[in-house]
Amino acid sequence: MTRAAVLNGLGAWVPPRVVTNDMLSAELDTTDEWIRTRTGIAQRHVIEPGTATSDVAVEAARLALKSAGTDRVDLVVVATSTPDRSCPATAPTVADKLGLSGVGAFDVAAVCTGFVYALATAAGLISSSVVDSALVIGADTFSTILDPADRSTRAIFGDGAGAMVLRAGRPGEAGAVGGFDLGSDGSGADLITVRAGGSEQRGSGAAAAAADTYFRMAGPRVFVQAVRHLSGSVRGTLAKSGWSVEDIGLLVPHQANARILGAVADELGVPADRVANNIGRVGNTVAGSIPLALADAAVRGRLTVGQRIVLTGFGGGLSWGSAALTWPGISTPAIGNDILEIK
Ligand code: UT7
């Protein structure tokens, strides 16, 4: 292959409003101690009323474009499971808000694996010369679909977005993206789901039960699958890249639960200091999670030019996926709203 997609810009954004564990404990039967111990999460960021996923996506995208030093791309891909509307896709809205009206734009829905799937799609379109550049955004506002009374999901999920700008380049250069591993198991669809609102429920002719309009997750069953598939998918990407576990300079897993990050690191034999971990400050931001964690690591000075990075995600579908890249010599990525510190 003579052409590859190369990382050219990175940005991430979370809404300014912080919801701490103590704030959740004031309205739900939970405690700061339970949430920190079981998940590693101290706070999450939540949108204000009147904000939609496209708004969050646009903020991250603007920072990524600034980091890349450009205001033009050929394609906008948005990974999200909380689109502005069930129809149309959110990406054309995002492109329009960015002044990119006219470019190709579509959504990718793979829940927490969405960013890896969107990255693989955009990288493939660049490698095959369909486009010369792309903006890949992972954005979700799960606060809009959580059951206000469900302590197990409200403790975990936060809103946020991350974005990458990709350009056409050469396979061996710093920033080149590749070695994708993608997988799914639809028999696990019920484990992470919003049952109502789609063709299955609407086509049944039955009215939606109120409880089914909210996001549901079978946490402990998902936990086991997450560790298994994240580890397996990382191995798949390493094999495709010709890398070994020792080559990983930074593993950037989907930030689902600090205990999952630890279990995956143990399973693979990756030292904890080579695993990106920002879940304490932002919670699980679904499709935004992986680029948010990468941007956080970059801002903290954890990356050097040419360093080998593996991104890995797991979530609803079930779905999983990983990607390999090297860190390019791009300027320090912009990151929004001071997500570096716990407030
Ligand atoms: O992002 C996509 C992929 N997602 C994941 O990978 C998430 C994977 N799952 C998890 O991270 C964990 O399963 C959770 C954090 C969701 C739950 O933690 P857990 O340690 O697996 O708890 P559990 O669901 O087994 O529940 C244990 C107990 C239950 O009480 P009983 O039935 O033992 O009395 C829950 O009701 O903890 C209770 N519980 C809580 N207690 C206080 C659940 N959530 C809370 C809470 N505060 N927020």
Image: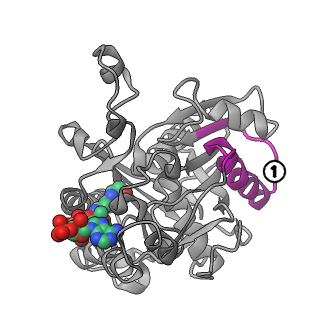
Picture layout, residue 314 above or below residue 183: below
Where residue 115 appears, as percent x and y from the top left, is 49, 49
Decide which of 134, 208 is in the foreground and name it: 208
Which type of secondary structure does the marked residue at label 1 adopt?
loop
Classify mark 1: residues with Cα within 10 Å, few (<14), some (14-19) or many (20+).
few
Image point 36% across, 56% down: which residue?
150
Which of these two is toward me, 153 or 23? 23
Residue 260 visible in the shown view: no
What residue span does the magenta drawing correspond to? 49-77
- Horizontally, residue 294 falls left or right of residue 236, namely right
Task: Report the residue at 59% width, 78% height from top.
Answer: 304
Whether the magenta-drawn stretch holds residue 50 is answered as yes
Eyeballing the image, is 336 above or below 80?
Answer: below
Give whichever of 127, 20 is nearer the camera: 20
Residue 303 visible, this angle: yes
Q: Quadrant of residue 33?
A: bottom left
**Residue 245 falls left or right of residue 16:** left
Q: Is residue 8 magenta?
A: no
> Quadrant of the image for the C terminus?
bottom right
Residue positioned 55% across, 57% down in the render: 159
Q: Amino acid at mark 1?
A: Thr
Indicate which quadrant contains ligand 1. bottom left
Choose top left, top right, bottom left or bottom right for residue 152: bottom left
Q: In this figure, which residue is indicated by the disc labeled 1?
A: 70
Q: Residue at x 26, y 80 (%)?
A: 269
CB of residue at label 1: within 8 Å of ligand 1? no
What colouring style does the render use? one colour
Disc tally is: 1
Q: Position of residue 199 (x, y in %)?
A: 36, 20
- Percent position (x, y) of residue 274? 42, 81
11 is higher (above) or lower (below) than 96: below
The residue nearer to you, when weighing 143 against 73, is 143
